[in-house]
Amino acid sequence: MKDKSKALEALLQENRVFAPPQDFVAQANANDAAIYDQASADRLGFWARQAESIDFFEPYNEVLEWDAPFAKWFVNGKLNVAYNCIDRHLKTDRRNKAAIIWEGEPGDTVTLTYQDLYREVNKFANVMRKLGVKKGDRVTIYLPMIPELAIAMLACARIGAPHSIVFGGFSADSLRDRIDDAQSTLLITADGGWRRGSVVPLKGNADQAVEGDSPVKNVVVVERVGLAKSNANMVEGRDLLWHELMKESSHICEPESMDSEDMLFILYTSGTTGKPKGVVHTTGGYLVGTASTHRYIFDLKENDVYWCTADIGWITGHSYIIYGPLANGATTVMYEGGPDYPNKDRFWEIVEKYGVNIFYTAPTAIRAFMKWGTQWPESRDLSSLRLLGTVGEPINPEAWMWYHKFIGGERCPIVDTWWQTETGQIMISPLPGLTKTTPGTATVPFPGIEVDVVDEQGNSSDAGYLIVKSPWPAMLRTVYGDPERYKSTYWSRFDDYYFTGDGAKRDELGNIWVMGRVDDVLNVSGHRIGTMEVESALVDHQSVAEAAVIGKTHELKGQAVAAFVTLKDGFEGTDDLMAELKAHVAKKIGAIARPEDIFFSAELPKTRSGKIMRRLLRDIAEGRKLGDTTTLADPSVVQKLMSQNDE
Ligand code: WT7
């Protein structure tokens, strides 16, 4: 905590204030500060006005029904998300506008107009119906960033089958857990995916995930890299090829009429326990929340080319590559590969090639760009850019300034957007035509959103925990299959407030500085990893008796996974075993969870009541002088660990 508050002092002294540029203000979607007052005077009225941009088949009769902590938004309204993201645009000048501009890692490209997207989505929706998928049935999607991913998710929305997208970097075991929890009957995957020129064996993982007892009846396989190259094996009677199914499918498919509160998707995310939570998002509120924030925060204009670099396997991709942008009739860019493939200017090449106007990425990526040097962005024409965004973790002021200068050419406002898988939509962010920004703060809540910083007792304070005081349209509705966990995780710490799990401070200008997680959740390159998940993966290895996992400050990733491991008798902490344990975690969870460091220790430092002292472990991992050790049951444990780390 001490180091954190030191870091904060440095941040709060950050007094560079950037007012929105005059020419930006003149054209901004939101340039009248009255929007804030109006929304706080009549919050539900504000959201009702936002809902006017969504087409309902049947009108809702109440904006919000709040039976804390269970919310219903736009009660009894009937609508379809795919219809809103596609069909309604066909009746306008947008029919032949690019909906999705896709670029593959090897350089292949596809542009889908709204009309194209309509045809492909309907065809795949019919494919799924033919395979027996009905409204309410869950479909798991394990695909790389290819057009079929967007098509599959919109097709699910069209027939009312909630999707559960599993990031392609997750392992077979993680995929199996998510399939089993959702009880999905259909899995959509690809033979493989491209990652820096090599093939990610998605189909191989998928096979392992559905082997033996599984609710999955069919696996639809997109041929992305070629069946021969990927070594993908097709299982007769179960596996079907996407392109063959699509050949005969009709492009007429009536959208299902969904209730505002029908489930749109489940997305699994890490929490404080070993088991990821299935965050449930529904239809009406989610669409209103994502579309309105996208329009205002990214100042979307009809002819903009908008690019969010996230993977659709995370909430950022769900809300701000697909649903928000397409509901707004935007042109959204989708890129399959890494930022440094084949060269470290790949992102800037894409910005130049498509004339990207709005660019949304993560601090971890910005720190990598900084490290690679300014020659890469400087060799490309980035003059099309007019607005920049960031998300995923607190942005360090140096990275903010670098982004501002070398990517934004000192002319583009930066929106630092705070939100979560659970919030569904951006909650804290500047409005780029209204809000003065300062590097490192996400500034103020979006209109209609009520957040606060509170102390242990739940009283408003300038430092403490970040909470949300009232329901918002895109909020999670529950944890799939576990409403008790929903209540206890989010709504029990502070009676009537939603607990975010983040610590925060508020400065004298009213800006909120999010300081990072206060629970056992790590943020590695903007991705959430539960310490317990990694600990369970380690303990799952035959050699491990006990494991404690912490986040270690990392220059590029923000945090890196560090593990302290006690071995069972008869095992020795060799380099080989270290490598094996790292590989074991990657295999159990996915490469993102692979520990950067493993420390072997005969014992773990514990308090007299048996609690592992993670603070000390962090000090050790980061090579700091140790804080207070007087509560340790056995102080010599720490000495041994320290001397080992010095070696
Ligand atoms: C956690 C949520 C939804 C975006 C992707 C991550 C951290 C996110 C910011 C920001 C400071 C941020 C928080 C939050 N976070 N954005 N702009 N400033 N912290 O979604 O995986 O659900 O993680 O990411 O700690 O709780 P997620």
Image (tube, rainbow, N blue to C red):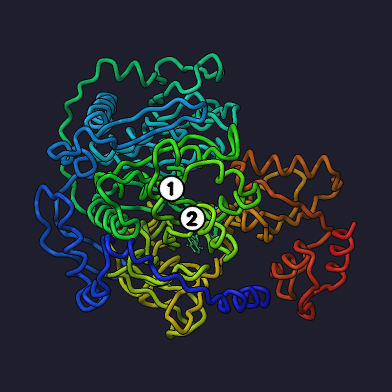
Disc 1, disc 2: CB below 8 Å? yes
| CB of mark 2 near ligand 1 (< 8 Å) | no
- In the image, 363 versus 237, the foreground residue is 363
Quadrant occupied by the C terminus: bottom right
Task: Please state the horizontal and vertical placement of residue 477, each as a whole percent of the image.
Answer: 32, 58
Badge 1 or badge 2: first in the primary sequence: 1
Q: Tell me, for residue 409, which label it has, or none.
A: 2
Residue 35 is situated, as x and y percent measured from the top left of the image, at: 24, 71
Residue shown at 27%/64% (left/top)?
30
Amino acid type, label 1? Ser
- Whether residue 617 is visible, yes or no, is yes
Task: Say what amino acid the circle numbered 2 marks.
Answer: Gly
Q: Is residue 42 left or right of residue 444?
A: left
Left or right of 433? Residue 15 is right
Label 2 secondary element:
loop
Q: Nearer the viewer, residue 376 or 289?
A: 376
Query: Mark number for residue 383?
Result: 1
Q: Residue at x 60, y 35 (%)?
A: 343
Residue 156, horizontal then vertical, whole percent: 29, 37
Q: Vertically, is 458 above or below 404?
A: below
- The x, y position of residue 549, in whole percent, is 68, 58
- Count of marks overlaid on the render: 2
For residue 194, what is the image quadrant?
top right
Q: Is mark 1 within 8 Å of ligand 1?
A: no
Q: Secondary structure at mark 1?
A: loop
